[in-house]
Image: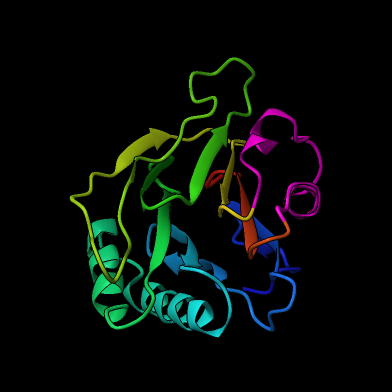
């Protein structure tokens, strides 16, 4: 996905922004947006470490996510695990949006964080996070369980790698386009000693 192009799927708007670690020519952090029959599959992938080997692992995982999009999340993760054997491996969070049922299902291996901010203030979805399990895709895949949450028009989802400071959740602005939000987070909360990527999606519903 072009990190400066909003992917408008009609029911979902997605944008990403990121940085490559200084001194490296390519990033090991990659975002994926894949259309599936009932909605879209989103992924944020962080190849371990940085530099060409991290990028190679992340790119292999991204290709696999595209190829397997539409299969259950656990199956997609298992395919990534097989693909990444012999590489550095990666940490990955997958999120699938069902535009017909207005739900999000997500799961993660490692520390790619996710949060939902509801369109309705005070909604119980505030700061709901995907179930993350320790492990490295390609080396150790833990037993996984996906979580499923209802979505309302206007809900905002953010996925970020560990190159983004954890505390941005407490301070960032929810206003603006998805691209503006992604750019602000990437520019203001990059740790500058690692690759970084943030993916922002706003749910617009099927109607």
Residue found 18% across the figure and 50% down from its top = 143
* Render colour scheme: rainbow
Position of 22 with respect to 42 (left or right) is right
> In front: 178, or 204?
178
Position of 40 with respect to 121 (left or right) is left
Residue found 34% across the figure and 38% down from its top = 148
Q: Where is residue 86 in the image (x, y as percent from the top left)?
A: 29, 83
Residue found 49% across the figure and 18% down from its top = 124
Q: Does the magenta stretch include residue 186?
A: yes
Q: Is residue 121 magenta?
A: no
Q: Where is residue 38 in the image (x, y as percent from the top left)?
A: 38, 57
Query: Relative to 127, is 188 above or below?
Result: below
Query: Relative to 86, is 73 above or below?
Result: above
Extreme residue in the left direction: 143
Q: How many numbered dots are placed on residues in this image?
A: 0
Query: Relative to 168, is 181 above or below?
Result: below
State the quadrant of the N terminus: bottom right
Position of 183 with respect to 112 (left or right) is right
Q: Position of residue 15 (x, y in %)?
A: 67, 59
Q: Position of residue 87 (x, y in %)?
A: 35, 81
Q: Give the range drawn in magenta.
A: 164-191
Extreme residue in the top direction: 122
Occupied quadrant, residue 78: bottom left
State the quadrant of the C terminus: top right
């Amino acid at each position: 996905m072009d990190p400066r192009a909003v992917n408008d799927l009609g029911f979902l708007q997605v944008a990403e922004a990121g940085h490559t670690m200084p001194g490296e020519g390519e990033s090991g952090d990659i975002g994926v947006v894949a259309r599936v029959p009932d909605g879209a599959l989103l992924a944020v992938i962080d190849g371990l470490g940085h530099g060409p080997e991290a990028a190679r692992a992340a790119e292999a995982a991204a290709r696999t996510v595209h190829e397997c999009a539409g299969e259950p999340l656990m199956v997609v993760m298992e395919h990534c695990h097989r693909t990444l054997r012999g590489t550095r491996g990666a940490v990955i969070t997958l999120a699938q949006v069902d535009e017909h049922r207005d739900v999000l299902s997500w799961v993660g291996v490692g520390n790619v964080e996710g949060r939902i901010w509801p369109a309705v203030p005070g909604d119980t979805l505030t700061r709901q996070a995907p179930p993350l399990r320790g492990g490295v895709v390609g080396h150790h895949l833990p037993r996984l369980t996906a979580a499923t949450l209802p979505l309302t028009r206007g809900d905002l989802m953010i996925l970020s790698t560990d190159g983004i400071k954890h505390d941005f959740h407490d301070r960032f602005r929810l206003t603006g386009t998805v691209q503006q939000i992604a750019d602000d987070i990437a520019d203001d909360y990059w740790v500058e000693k690692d690759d970084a990527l943030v993916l922002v999606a706003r749910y617009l519903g099927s109607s």
